Image (tube, grey):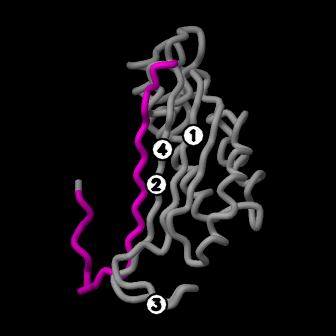
Amino acid sequence: MPLPPPDCPREASHQRSITITAYARSDGLWDIEGHLTDAWTKPVPCAGGMLPPGQPMHSMRLRLTLDASATIVAAQAATDAGPYGEACGAIAPDYGQLVGVKVAKGYRDAIRRLFGRTAGCTHMNELAGVMGSAALQAMWDVMTQNPDEKPFSIDGCHALKSSSPQVAQFFPRWYRPEAG
């Protein structure tokens, strides 16, 4: 269902786009590639002068390579555009610190711990965060092959609460009725 129409006239001023593509590699690993861009509809000031409308002020890319357990085994970051030129992209190599982090509960906390405040790039951190859920979606089949492990999605949202009808129907082994 689409959003209802706005209640007053409006004009677009900014667009943020995040695209994420997952690749199953021939060596059994997964590449999750993300790209974040920010662009304005009017000229905006940046360190190099005025940025023309539509030209991205931020264009950041991140590739996470994961094994079958969703542990990051390689990470590469790149900044194509940033408001402070090369200074923005200088932090990109530091995102190699994501190696060893598991994309699971606590993943976003690990990003904050490693790259919070001045230790990272706000936009790269944001991109890394949303890439986690995309990775889990892409790897769903791999990560749910062990019938003895509770699927990671149970108790991860309201629809898959352990006591929900959806869990009772699709994951009956893990259904837990609410204490009444």
Tell me where residue 6 appears, x and y as whole percent. Answer: 26, 76
| Label 1, residues with CA under 10 Å away: few <14, some 14-19, many ≥20 | many
Res. 64 mark: 1
Rendering coords of residue 60 (x, y %):
52, 60
Q: Residue at x 59, y 15 (%)?
A: 149
Q: Name the residue under label 3.
A: 50
Q: Give the range drawn in magenta.
A: 2-27
Asked whether 112 or 10 is in front, the reply is 112
Tag 2: Cα neighbours inside 10 Å, few (<14), some, or many (≥20)? many
Q: Is there a contact, CB below 8 Å, between mark 4 and mark 3?
A: no
Which residue is denoted by mark 4 in the rendering?
33
Residue at 58% across, 50% down: 129
**Tag 3 secondary structure:** strand
Using the numbered discs, state the Cα–Cα distance from disc 3 to disc 1 in whole angstroms: 33 Å
In front of the other: 116 or 87? 87
Res. 180 in view: no
Query: What separation in Å lies between label 1 and label 2 (alpha carbons)?
Result: 12 Å
The mark nearer the N terminus, 1 or 2, is: 2
Q: What is the CA distance from the residue labelled 2 to the residue labelled 3? A: 23 Å
Q: Kindly identify the amino acid type of the residue bearing the numbered disc 2.
A: His
Residue 21: say if magenta.
yes
